[in-house]
Image (cartoon, grey):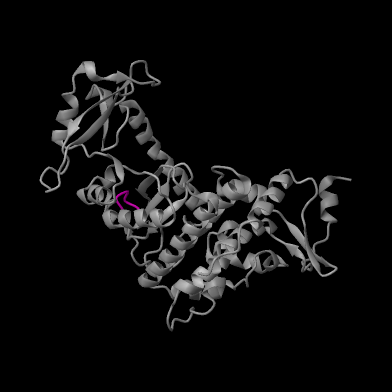
Amino acid sequence: MRLSHSLDRVGVAFDDHRLIDHAGLLLPATLAAHLGLRALVDRHVDLGAAPGRAHAGDKLLTLVASALAGGDCIDDAEALRAGGTAGVLGHRVKAASTLGTFLRSFRWGHVRQLDAVSRGLLARAWAAGAGPGAAPCTIDLDSTICETYGLAKQGARHTYTHVRGYHPLLAVAAGTGDVLHTRLRGGNAYSGRGAGSFLSETIERVRDAGATGALTLRADSGFYSHAVVAAARARRVRFSITVRQFAVVRRLMEAIPEADWTPIPYWLEGGAAVAETTYIPFASAPDAAPVRLIVRRVRPTPGSQLALFATYDYHAFITDRDGDTLTLEADHRRHAEVENAIRDLKYGVGLNHLPSGKFGANGAWLAVQVIAHNLARWTARIGLGAAIVTTKTLRRRLFSLPGRLTRSARRLTLHFPARWPWALPFAAALRRLRALPAPLPA
C-alpha cells in the first residue's frame, strides 16, 4: 500500500479537552507567577471607565502567552483557549475580541502605566538572579523601524528609510539582551528625538532594579547629541557614542599622524587601523569638555565606488571611559549586538506587526512584546543557566511541547511526548523556577 493511501485512512477528531498546545508555556508562566506579574498589572494599570478596563492582569498575561507561543496578531490568542491549555497558564485566557477591546482602551498615559509594570518586573527578575548586581553593566541605546501598511494607523508616517511605520526607542542590556526600556514614537521621529529623557529614565530603572556597578552607555551617531551626553554625565554614566562626521571632525581625523595608527586584524591585509586624539564636542555648550576621540580607519574594498574617491573610510566615537584604545574600540563595535535583541523582538515575538489603528493600542502592544521577550530571556537565564537563547529556540525546544493534562488521586499530571530531546533541561528549568520565592506584594 502506498504511503499516501495509508495517510488517507487516518481519521481526524477535535474532541480531546485534555490536550494542550504549547504546554511548555508552563515554564514562563511559572516565572511570571513567581515574579507577581499579574499583581503588578492589577496595581498599576487603571483604564478608568474604558470598555476594556476589567481583569487587566488576565488580559495582559493572555497577550504575553500568545506572543511566547508565536502569535503575532490579536486573533492568534484564540489558540490558547483550545483543549486544556489554560491549565498550564495559571490565569483565565481571554477571547481575542476582548483583547482587542482591551488594547484599544489604552491612551498614552495608560501606556506609561505599563512602563511601571515592566520596571517593577525588571527589578523582581534581577533580584531573583537575572541581574548584574555589582558587576559593570552596559546600556545599548538604539531605535528601529516597525513597518506598517495601513494608511489609517495613528502616528504611522514615512520614516528616514522612506517606509511607512513607527520608530520606537529601545534600551538593551549588553550581553543579556534584556530590554530595559522602550518608547513608541511616530515614524517621522528622528533617531535622537527624546533620547535624553529616555536615557535618564532607563538609568533610573536600572539603578532601581539593583544594578550597583559601573554603567556605560553605547550608542550610534543617531544619538550623538548634547542632551544624551548631558544625561549620562548627570548620572555618572560613562559613554561611548559614534560621532557625526562634521567637517571639523573629518579634518581632525585626517590630521592624526601616521605613526599614531595601530593596525588591527582585518580581512584585507593592512586594511584597518585605530588611533585616538582629543576633541571637544558641543563646544558652544556651557558644560563643554574635552573627551577622547577614538578613530578606526578602513581601506575601501578594491574596485568599489568608494575606493575611487577615498583612501580610507573613517569611523569614530567619543568617549570619557578609561582604558586601552584598542580595547575600547573593540567594545564600541560590540554595540551592534543590540540588533540581535531587536531581531528577537520582531521575529521571536510579535513586534514586527503593530495591529491597531490606535497609537495607544500599539504602544501597549510594544510593552506586551517587551515583557514576553524578557520573560523568555529570564526563563533561559534563571531556569536553564544559559546566557542568551533566542525566543525561537526556546519555543522550538521547550515552549511548543504538546501535552496532555490528567487528574489522578486529586493530583494533576502534565504528560509530554516520550523521548523528547530536551526533556532533562525542561525538568531542571521547572525545578529552578518553582524554587524562586513567592512574589512580594505589588
The outermost residue toward the right is 1
Picture coordinates of residue 149, whole percent (x, y): 41, 59
Picture coordinates of residue 388, whole percent (x, y): 54, 43
Q: Does the magenta run of residues contain 160?
A: yes
Picture coordinates of residue 81, whole percent (x, y): 66, 69
Residue 69 shown left or right of residue 353 in the figure:
right
Does residue 96 lie above or below 284 as drawn? below
Picture coordinates of residue 55, whole percent (x, y): 54, 77
Residue in the image at 47% along x and 46% along y = 132
Principal SS element in the magenta part? Answer: loop
Nearer-the-camera pick, 368 or 386: 386
Nearer-the-camera pick, 375 or 185: 375
Nearer-the-camera pick, 385 or 28: 385
Residue 240 shown left or right of residue 121 in the figure:
left
* Residue 69 visible within the image: yes
Residue in the image at 31% along x and 55% along y = 200
* Residue 167 visible within the image: no
Residue in the image at 45% along x and 72% along y = 44
Nearer-the-camera pick, 441 or 295: 441
Residue 41 shown left or right of residue 382 in the figure:
left
> What's drawn in magenta, residue-wise?
159-163
Q: Can you tell which quarter of the image residue 339 is in?
A: top left
